[in-house]
Amino acid sequence: MNPALEQSYFTVTEQPGQPASRIQLEMLEARYAWAAEQAREKDVLEAGCGAGLGLPALGRVARSVQAGDVDAENMRAARAVCAGHANVAVRAFHAGELPFPSESFDLVLLFEAIYYVPDVRRFLEETRRVLRPGGTLLIVTVNPEWDGFNPSPLKTRYWSAADLLAALREEGFLARVQGAFPETASLNTWALGLVRRTAVALNLIPRTMRGKALLKRIFYGRLKAVPPLTGASSAPPMLEELDTAGSHHHRVLYATAQKTL
């Protein structure tokens, strides 16, 4: 078996019912609202789908959705979440080995997972192969240049705006990278950022999503349970163009890459 398929990502993945802060829920809802806008009546593939929280939103508008992950517990959760959607299927696969025929999809998604992919170049090659001419790859990832950035213990590599643009363009995509969820400057956010950076430097951040819930309660106030997303009332985020200089105040990067004809 591929070693990556033996790695458990369940404890670092957002799960249904898990406590989450308001900003965490907004970011989760926004990325799938953004994808759903572009998925209508299309054949969609989501690699690294995690617990499948966005699959109901995609299944509601897409012609078909294929999704997969390398973690067995995540896939069980994903299948339960999308059980009522006949046009959604979940199976095990690695992002660098997409088990689908060439030119099968109009839209490919990789959301908050690129930093777990061992060989991103191989994933991009595979994505170009399975996309139809004119098809689109959407990537959403935390911005590692954001002042409040906290790395996952299971990461392989984090990608800056410049890194993403370079990799996508080298693979032949027509690409752009935008920033979302800027952190506004204030004394409170500065102090919060200092506390976060200190905790990261001293290795005090819990390694699991469950462990992080207590810190989120302290930093962000009352938490709410993560719901499966229907997409019925969610709105895509406000996006700002980023150049190769990147950004230190946007929390999230949104990359759009079109397969040229």
Image: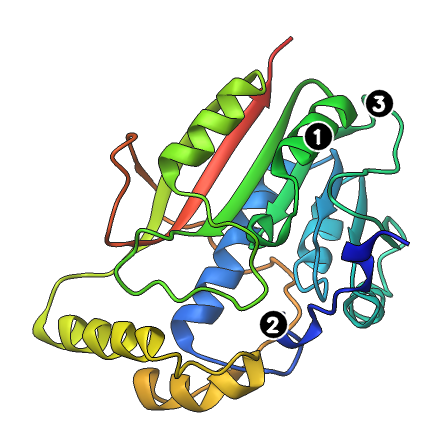
| SS at circle 3 | loop
The residue closer to the viewer here, 223 or 123, is 123
Q: Is residue 135 visible?
A: yes
Q: Residue at x 72, y 67 (%)?
A: 51
Task: Give, as a three-letter code, the residue at label 1.
Answer: Thr
Q: From the image, tell me which residue sits under label 1.
A: 127
Amino acid, disc 2: Val
Residue pointed to by mark 2: 12
Occupied quadrant, residue 54:
bottom right
Quadrant containing the N terminus in the rendered view:
bottom right
The residue at which mark 3 appears reads as 102
Q: Residue furthest top?
A: 261
Q: Position of residue 94 (x, y in %)?
A: 78, 47
Task: Judge the density around disc 3: few (<14), some (14-19), many (≥20) Cα neighbours within 10 Å.
Answer: some
- N-terminal of the two: label 3 or label 1? 3
Tell me which corner region of the image, top left, top right, bottom left or bottom right, holds residue 239.
Answer: top left
Q: Name the kind of residue labelled 3 in the image.
A: Ser
Q: Say which label, 1 or 2, has the lower sequence index.
A: 2
